[in-house]
Amino acid sequence: MRLSTLLAHRREILRQANLANLAFAYERLAEFARRIQSGALQGTVLLKQADAENDRPWPTLTALHGSQAALEEHFTEEDVIDLSDVLDYALEASEEALTFDLADIRSRFLPPVRQALVQAGIAMDELPPNIQKMPGLSTSACEDEEN
């Protein structure tokens, strides 16, 4: 590929990269929602970003209400890093700490990512059956949001 060709297509490449990142965020958030539902996890959590200056080299997820052991059983350190990254991307802001209820992943964070993909003209694949059963995420509910 020639440099001039790459530069001529830069805007579209950046658009596609953004959509790919949104799709990844959507897929990971849906997986987190599935794990939360199947593990019957509940309660408020605190997600803190990595902060090397304060001796926290990676993000942490702490149960404020609920079981810390259950969180650690269902989410690896890599999962917490992914959760931190996708929420930063989906929220379009890097917050040092974010407090939310575990149910918020399904009800608060996932729908706007899906809506952004749909508005960009992305045809959404069918959700897995265990995710479709979750309130607010059925294909028909998402179609209703479009209308």
Image: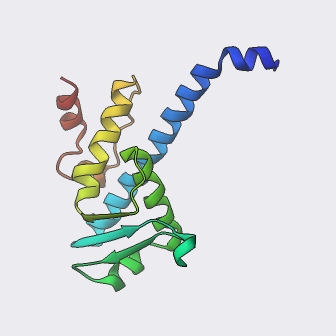
Farthest front residue?
Answer: 53
- Compared with residue 137, is residue 96 higher up or lower down, i.e. above or below? below
Left or right of residue 46, residue 83 in this image: right
Residue 27 seen in the figure: yes
Please identify the quarter of the rendering in which residue 60 is found. Answer: bottom left
Residue 56 seen in the figure: no
Which sits in the foreground, 124 or 61?
61
Q: Residue at x 23, y 35 (%)?
A: 142
Q: Position of residue 122 (x, y in %)?
A: 41, 27
Q: Residue at x 55, y 79 (%)?
A: 55
Q: Position of residue 111 (x, y in %)?
A: 27, 42
Instruction: Give the position of the N terminus as an image quadrant.
Output: top right
Left or right of residue 20, residue 137 in this image: left
Q: Position of residue 145 (x, y in %)?
A: 19, 31
Name the image colouring.
rainbow
Please identify the quarter of the rendering in which residue 138 is found. Answer: top left
Please identify the quarter of the rendering in which residue 140 is found. Answer: top left
Instruction: Give the position of the C terminus as an image quadrant.
Output: top left
Q: Residue at x 44, y 60 (%)?
A: 84
Q: Residue at x 53, y 67 (%)?
A: 78
Which sits in the foreground, 20 or 64?
64
